[in-house]
Amino acid sequence: MHIGIAGAGLLGRLLAFELARAGHKVEVFDPASGAEPQAGSPARAAGWTAAGMLSPVAELERAGEEVFQLGLRSCALWPGIVAALAQPVALTMNGSLLLAHRSDAGSAQRLIGLLQAKAAIHIHPQLLSRAELAQLEPAVNGPALAWLLPNEGLINPIQAMQALAAQATALGVHWHWQSAVNDLGNGALTCAGQARPRRFDHVFDVRGVGAKPALPVRGVRGEIIWLHAPGVQLKRPLRLMHPRISGYLVPRPDDIIVVGASEIESEDRSPISLRSTVELLTAAHSVIPELAEARMVHSETNLRPALPDNMPRIVNQPGITRINGLYRHGWLIAPALVERALLPMAGPDSEPAQAVNAMTASEVLS
Ligand SMILES: Cc1cc2nc3c(=O)[nH]c(=O)nc-3n(C[C@H](O)[C@H](O)[C@H](O)COP(=O)(O)OP(=O)(O)OC[C@H]3O[C@@H](n4cnc5c(N)ncnc54)[C@H](O)[C@@H]3O)c2cc1C
């Protein structure tokens, strides 16, 4: 089939790669100026900014069974996807740590209880002794309480975005940069400034926050800070449980630690605020006091695409599929969502396309 994709963020690149390797002819349209991350561009894909945590259990604090199941499935799919990419992508499944200071033990226990109630028993958080924590993450010496979430992982989103685009290109995908799509319909999409629609056998709308007004999507502001911290070694993501501030630390290559993330109901993409900076860095410093001498080398603001109920959706209409609402767990759930979205195209012998979250546009809009 000849496929058009509007949006070259996380979903657009993953779809392009999967469709091209299934033998389809694919064209992708995006307002960005190219496949690489554009420094200073205020409206780039959220996929570039993400920490890349693959946290099916920790995300149960905010999410339900569906995101949990999509997350487990995606954690199983990511290694195969990464193995099929020519460029290296760091992907680890070493688990993650939930941390709390003694003074916050009450609220931490409530959260652990919530995760235990929602997650399958074999992946419950495991309380660690001081010695076990020191063995797993010697750099962490602030918090008194630590739990290991054994099945969680971490992907490097920048490497993955680049590698997916490169592999899709090698498979023949054609990219139309500086091409915003204004309208999509049955097998057609229309780019800004062009009077006539381009025709395809099927089109996908994966424009994230840019899918308004076709979908009732909103942007949820998130801010992150990159610290250069030579000598501070982390092997897995750390999350600090705190009654008011939720912060995490994620290791990246070249002695970088990403500290994130604020979550603010606003579509303001302006630079990080003083309040968020203070809160995120206070949380990070309380987990690893040695970060006091780290250097702040970069900060970034972006918008998570969310639907009104904060749930992901696959919306099927004749000749067009819209996928949106990946919110704060896009890297966690994208492979499973793409797998479900592509089921109808897999041919008559495939499993029925019974995506549990597939809805019509009118269902979503209502
Ligand atoms: C601070 C932060 C931290 C995060 N951390 C994590 C994490 O640790 N783990 C996790 O799982 N998820 C995380 N996420 C969430 C994740 O990044 C998103 O859920 C995911 O990127 C959404 O993917 P998407 O493809 O729907 O949208 P995007 O990645 O935003 O891509 C949308 C694309 O559509 C393009 N577009 C917009 N308008 C148009 C138009 N008119 N025509 C054509 N193209 C258009 C954009 O240019 C962009 O390339 C985080 C997000 C943020 C902001």
Image (cartoon, grey):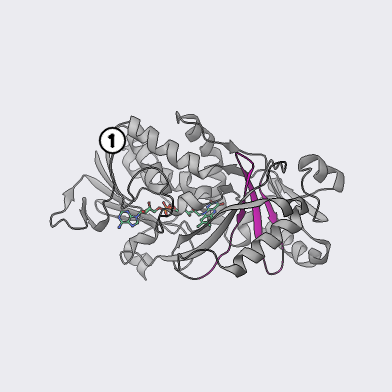
Q: Residue visible at 86% across and 48% down?
A: 130
Q: Looking at the figure, which quarter contains the N terminus?
A: top left
Image check: 53 left or right of 360? right
Q: Is residue 193 left or right of residue 250?
A: left
Q: Nearer the viewer, residue 317 or 292?
A: 292
Based on the picture, tell me whether residue 35 belongs to the magenta stretch. no
Residue at horizontal 75 percent and vertical 67 percent from the top: 107
For residue 232, above or below residue 277: above
Please provide the residue range marked out in magenta.
237-265
* Residue 298 picture location, percent across and down: 55, 53
Q: Is residue 282 visible?
A: yes
Residue drawn at (24%, 51%) of the image: 319
Q: Residue 259 in magenta? A: yes
Q: Tell me if residue 119 comes above or below residue 168 in the rendering.
A: below
User: Within the displayed image, which quadrant is ligand 1 positioned in?
Assistant: bottom left
The x and y percentages for residue 67 are 53, 54
Q: Residues within 10 Å of mark 1 (few under 14, many from 20)?
A: some
Q: Quadrant of residue 114?
A: bottom right
State the residue position of label 1.
24
